[in-house]
Amino acid sequence: MIHLKNYADTEDIFQTVFLKYVLSSVSFESKEHEKAWIIRVTVNACRDLLKSFFRSRTVPLEELVREPAAAPTGEDREVLEAVLSLPGKYKDVVYLHYYEGYTAPEIGRILGKNANTVYTLLTRAKGLLRERLGGEDDG
C-alpha cells in the first residue's frame, strides 16, 4: 500500500508475489532469508507495475467520469448514427466533445493527441457530417 497507494493494485501484487513464491525453486536458508526474499520480490513487483507502459499511458477513472447523456430520439438519433459512422479518428473526438462534454485539451490528454490536432479533427468531422446530413454552412 505504501508504494502503490491503491488497494486493488496491492491485491494484484500480493497475488503475483504469492504465485512466484509457490512456483519458486529457491531453497531458503532461514525464515529471515525467506522473509527478505518475499519483501524484495514485492518491492520489485511494485516498481515494475509503477513503471509499466499501461500505467503510464492511462488516466484514473475518476478523471473520466461524467454524467450520462439522455438517450437520443428522432433527429438526434440520425445525427448520432452519422457520428458513429465516421472514421474512428473523427468519431472519437466528436463523441467526446459533443456528447460527453470534454474540451479539446481534455480530449487530447485522453487520446494522447495535441489539442490543435483535436481541433483539426473536429473541424474535418463537422465537414463530413455536413455532407452526410445535408446541413447548411452555418454550423
Image (tube, rainbow, N blue to C red):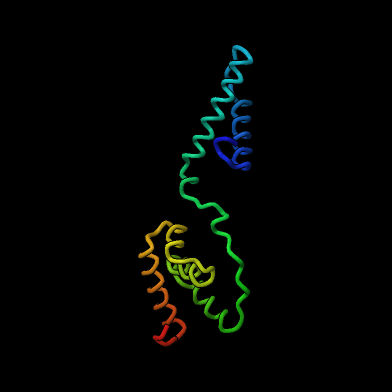
- In this rendering, the count of numbered labels is 0
Q: Residue furthest top?
A: 29
Residue located 45% across and 62% down the image? 107
Residue located 59% across and 41% down the image? 9
The one nearer the camera, 80 or 55, is: 55
Vertical arrangement, residue 100 with respect to residue 43, above or below: below
The one nearer the camera, 39 or 15, is: 39
Which part of the image, by quadrant, shows the C terminus?
Answer: bottom left
Where residue 77 sits: x, y (%)? Answer: 57, 79
The one nearer the camera, 76 or 70, is: 70
Relative to 34, is 87 on the left or the right?
left
Residue located 53% across and 33% down the image? 45
Where residue 137 sits: x, y (%)? Answer: 39, 86
Vertical arrangement, residue 20 with respect to residue 102, above or below: above
Relative to 108, is 68 on the left or the right?
right
Relative to 32, is 58 on the left or the right?
left
Where residue 108 sits: x, y (%)? Answer: 42, 60
Which part of the image, by quadrant, shows the N terminus?
Answer: top right
Where residue 74 sits: x, y (%)? Answer: 60, 83
Q: Quadrant of residue 132?
A: bottom left
The one nearer the camera, 133 or 38, is: 38
Residue located 46% across and 61% down the image? 106
Q: Quadrant of residue 66?
A: bottom right
